[in-house]
Amino acid sequence: MFGGGDSCGRASGCAALKALAQKYNFPKVEDPGLVMLLRFSLGKESRSKLLHFTYFKSLIALTGLLLPLFDFSWQRISDPECIADVLRQVYADHSLNVDNVFHCILETTQHPAAAASFASIMFAPQAELSFSEALSRCDMNGVPICLMYGKEDPWVKPVWGLEVKKHVPEAPYYEISPAGHCPHDEVPEVVNYLLRGWIKSLESQGAAALPLLDDMQSENIQSSIAKDLEFVRQGSNKSVIVRFMGSSFSLWNRMESYFTSRFAKLETKWQ
């Protein structure tokens, strides 16, 4: 299963995670696993409780005083200029042609049921099983999980990815840079390479090393390693930096690595 993201992406990601946490039966899948593109934050759950509505209350609100406010918000959100502005924030590489994505989103917002679907998401009741609880339950049930994250995500900062990693410390965590909110669309070559390598490692029961680790075992990587990954797109060579987070990697490790690199650059500059 593949999940993550805001709006429909987050909904599908949470649905996949919670389905696995509940041990639902999946046809023709002996060992279901989950790949998560980290585009959500655990911290939003606490805020969602403060904004919790039942369906009954939401219907009253939408047919009453809040209806004009909702209409105004929807008109703003579905405006082509607003959509274009959001897409400029989504991608770290602004040279990418996102016209197809733009037109797909615009077409969706023009569907007669689009506003109602948006309202049903915004005013849906709180799920019985929270995201963090589902994540922990998947870990306890031995569900294979792989985490992938775009470092330049403008909304969900690296601290949220590390928070998810804390819940599943043994899950491989890959941070891709430069990549923004949708790494699977911005650098699909890299995401597919990591995904294929993770699946191969699962199928071989660890005989095949995880991507970036070569012959090293992931349990032996306590902090993190980073490597350049090169790929070809439309005849041009491109590259990104992919960092693998080890089982004991923490926010402090990240800060220490950042300041060490900064001091090293300053020393080189003044020599």
Image (tube, rainbow, N blue to C red):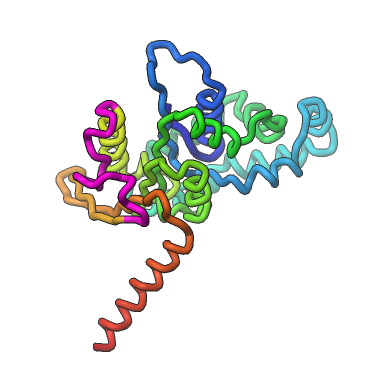
For image coordinates 28% across by 26% down, the residue present is: 203
Is residue 21 rendered magenta in the image? no
Task: Depth check: give the residue in front, 269 or 145.
Answer: 145
Give residue 163's position: percent from left, percent from top.
52, 50
The prevailing secondary structure element of the residues shown in magenta is loop
Residue 176 in the figure: left or right of residue 228? right
Give residue 254's position: percent from left, percent from top.
42, 62
Give residue 202's position: percent from left, percent from top.
31, 30
> Which of the 4 quarters of the picture holds residue 194?
top left
Residue 162 in the figure: left or right of residue 122? left
For image coordinates 41% across by 42% down, the residue present is: 170
Camera sees residue 249: yes
Residue 182 in the figure: left or right of residue 269? right
Is residue 208 rendered magenta in the image? yes
> Which of the 4 quarters of the picture holds residue 182?
top left
Numbered disc total: 0
Q: Residue furthest bottom?
A: 271
For image coordinates 52% across by 17% down, the residue present is: 24
Camera sees residue 108: no
Q: Which residues are magenta?
A: 203-224
Residue 174 in the figure: left or right of residue 90? left
For image coordinates 59% across by 45% down, the residue present is: 42
Give residue 201's position: percent from left, percent from top.
27, 33
Q: Residue furthest top?
A: 27
In the rendered image of this protein, does residue 7 appear above or below residue 29?
below
Q: Residue furthest front?
A: 220
Task: Depth check: give the residue in front, 115 or 198.
Answer: 198
* Image quadrant where one finds the N terminus: top left
* Image quadrant where one finds the C terminus: bottom left
